[in-house]
Image (cartoon, rainbow, N blue to C red):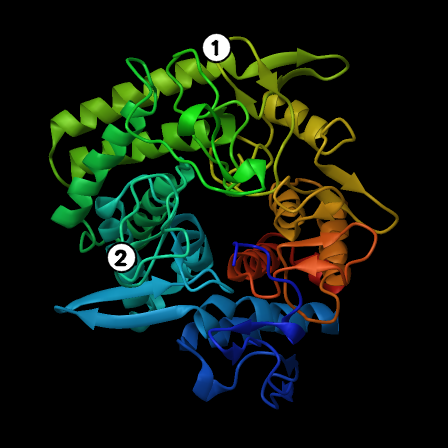
Amino acid sequence: MERRKFLKYNSMALGGMLFAPYVNSASVFPDSGFVSNRPSVSDRKFISPVIEKTIKLVQGKITNPKLSEMFGNCFPNTLDTTIDFSMKDGKPDTFVITGDIKAMWLRDSAAQVWPYLKFVNEDKKLDLLIQGVLNRQAKCINIDPYANAFNKDAIGSEWASDNTDMKPELHERKWEIDSLCYPVRLLYQYWKTTNKNICFTEEWHEAFKIIVETFKKQQRKKDRGDYSFMRKTEKATDTLSDNGYGNPVFPNGLIVSSFRPSDDATVLPFLIPSNYFAAETLMRIQEIASDVYHDQSLSRKARLFAGSVRLGLRNYARAEKPDLGEVLAYEVDGFGNKLFMDDANVPSLLSLPYLDLMQKDDPLYINTRKFILSEYNPWFFKGRDFEGIGSSHTGVGMIWPISVIMRALTSTDENEIKDCVNMLIKSQSDTEFMHESFSVENPSNYTRSWFAWANSLFGELVLNIAENHPQLLKTI
């Protein structure tokens, strides 16, 4: 089955078994006072005492019962349902499925565990879990840096017939810049949080070299590079034109991303949010290569490369819009063509401050934000009760909760944050979980009942509000 095509849980089956990760009998936990749709304790994949303690602490600050229940269900969802943790050859190994598909996306897995990172110094088991994710991600990158999703073992995939260099370890091989950026973001922040070098293995040293080399090839300065992809499909966004290489580009220092974070093909292959992410990723590699590996050659390559990407962004990513001033395009091709829109999935233009790629008060971001949160963005939808950004991946009229969460996380306006949270509460359609998307007119029409990244991100938002805007939790 194609990714992100799962609908309501009450009619699904997976592997011959009823697929119902949340539909165990709801139970009241006397010690916390909230109604839980979590799996029973014995069925949870991973339990962290510090996360359980945090849930209770935050719920104690929330006055809205529904918001309290949603936080209690969503925040631990990745741990409850998606973790496969073990020790292999004395080292932790963590395989993290995305939810309704038993495969590990590099992007999703890093994002799913990100909200737990701040707690690793308080929980040794949680620390090992994050180490295991990082160990697994380095292994995946070294298998194939162009793949976006991996199997737990070398078992093949339903996409084995794709016309690209598929390996049995791969679930899918769509080249997306952010697939290599997210693991580096997680590793870098783990290092800064714990001050530990334990994850800086030779496997990661090799992965850093591969990341830099892959980015370099996809600048396409000399040729079209060594990646191509075609799929037999009725969906145009699921394959690439021009014999699998995508639309042509004029080399300008930017990096081609054949697919968006939504797993849809790019129209103009220089994807701007992902290039911002790549430039920052290269600077993180530069610092790690210098300070940890003492590899000055790699450090210099990464630093110079980041500079060339940033120059390309400055020269090719911007344009003037009437009544707004200078804004960022979503995609460009170097020939002068620019696509003005934003997609819900992250990295997006909306998410740039969240990923520490641009300041919230940067005039360029402020102008861009006004544009993408308006009717001028073809993937911004507004109805009576809801408004937000969607994606060609789920079609017209479908808002992604991730975009509403990201709007709140990047806002400086408490009223806007409050409005976003209220929309998220209304959008959950009595499931008390986030979904991939929902209809702007009818939230009970949604895709993906088990989308762990959206749940983790919602939990991160509530934590952020508790830390930075605690008074809001008493007024929502």
Amino acid tagged 1: Asn
Which quadrant of the rendered structure holds the C terminus?
A: bottom right
Would residue 295 appear left or right of 356 to someone viewing this image? left
Three-letter code, disc 2: Arg
- Give the CA separation, mark 2 to mark 1: 37 Å
Q: Earlier in the sequence, mark 2 or mark 1?
A: 2
Q: Residue at x 46, y 74 (%)?
A: 15
Q: Position of residue 352 (x, y in %)?
A: 53, 34
In the foreground, 392 or 159: 159
Residue 305 at x, y percent in the picture: 29, 21
Residue 171 appears at what percent x and percent y? 37, 54
Looking at this view, name the residue that lies furthest to the bottom: 30
Residue 69, image quadrant: bottom right
How packed is label 2: few (under 14 Cα within 10 Å), some, or many (20 or more)?
A: many
Q: Is residue 109 left or right of residue 440?
A: left
Name the disc covering residue 315, or none: 1
